[in-house]
Image (cartoon, helix red, strand yellow):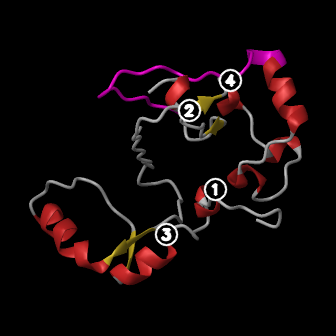
Amino acid sequence: MNPENGSTETWLGTHNRTIAREGGQKGQRATGHIAPELLAQQIEVAGPPVQPTLRKGSFAIRDFTIWHAGMPNKTQDIRIMLAQIHFASWFPNPTRLELADDIKPILEDLDAKGELGLEVPVNWVSKEEVQATYLNRALGKKYKVNKTEEE
């Protein structure tokens, strides 16, 4: 993963900032909209964003609150990146996964064997529902190719 094939852009030091403290609108941070003047201020404090270069099989760990942006893959090669988000068990996180009920036995089997090792907050729905709605979830709009101004 590298800047040419779209490594994630990160803004170093932004884990110390929050949009809420800086007058952002509710939900503004989750939509990916950070005011240009805040970006300019951050460049003055810590420099411009960076895009790391990582070898295949490597991984990066980052604070969930650091400003970041998905970047385009400028090559013709397929680039796959996987992400996992973990929260401490005591953290009040209302987020739940929506998974197809046909994989429920697989997770239950791993959990029974002690191989899962994590609490997985899930809302089980039909496979058809997952396939029909996966791009229209709260954060899914960023994946739509044909965005309109209203979106």
Secondary structure of the residue carrying tag 4 is: loop
Do labels 2 and 1 touch, CB within 8 Å?
no
Q: CA distance from mark 1 to mark 3?
A: 12 Å
Q: Residue at x 46, y 67 (%)?
A: 96
The N terminus: image quadrant: top left
The CA span between labels 2 and 1 is: 18 Å
Label 1 packing within 10 angstroms: few (<14), some (14-19), many (20+): some
Question: Magenta span has 94?
Answer: no
Q: Depth check: 85 or 114 in front?
A: 85
First reached walking from the N terminus: tag 2 or tag 1:
2
Q: Which mark is residue 74?
A: 2
* Among the two numbered marks 4 and 2 on one chain, the one whose residue lies closer to the N terminus: 4
Residue hosting label 3: 134
10 Å crowding of disc 4: few (<14), some (14-19), many (20+): some
| Mark with earlier residue (1, 3) | 3
Give the distance between the C-alpha atoms of the residues marked 3 and 2, in whole angstroms.
Answer: 25 Å
Viewer-proximal residue among 81 and 92? 81
In which quadrant of the rendered view does residue 101 lie? bottom left
Magenta region, residue range: 44-62
Q: In the rendered image of this protein, does residue 35 appear above or below residue 29?
A: above
The spot of residue 112 in percent (x, y) is 12, 66
In reply to whether residue 46 is colored magenta, the answer given is yes
Q: Amino acid at mark 3?
A: Tyr
Q: Are marks 1 and 4 in contact (CB under 8 Å)?
A: no
Q: Which mark is residue 63?
A: none
Structural distance between the alpha carbons of marks 4 and 2: 18 Å
Q: What label sits on residue 49 in the rendered view?
A: 4
Residue placed most toward the observer, 90 or 81: 81
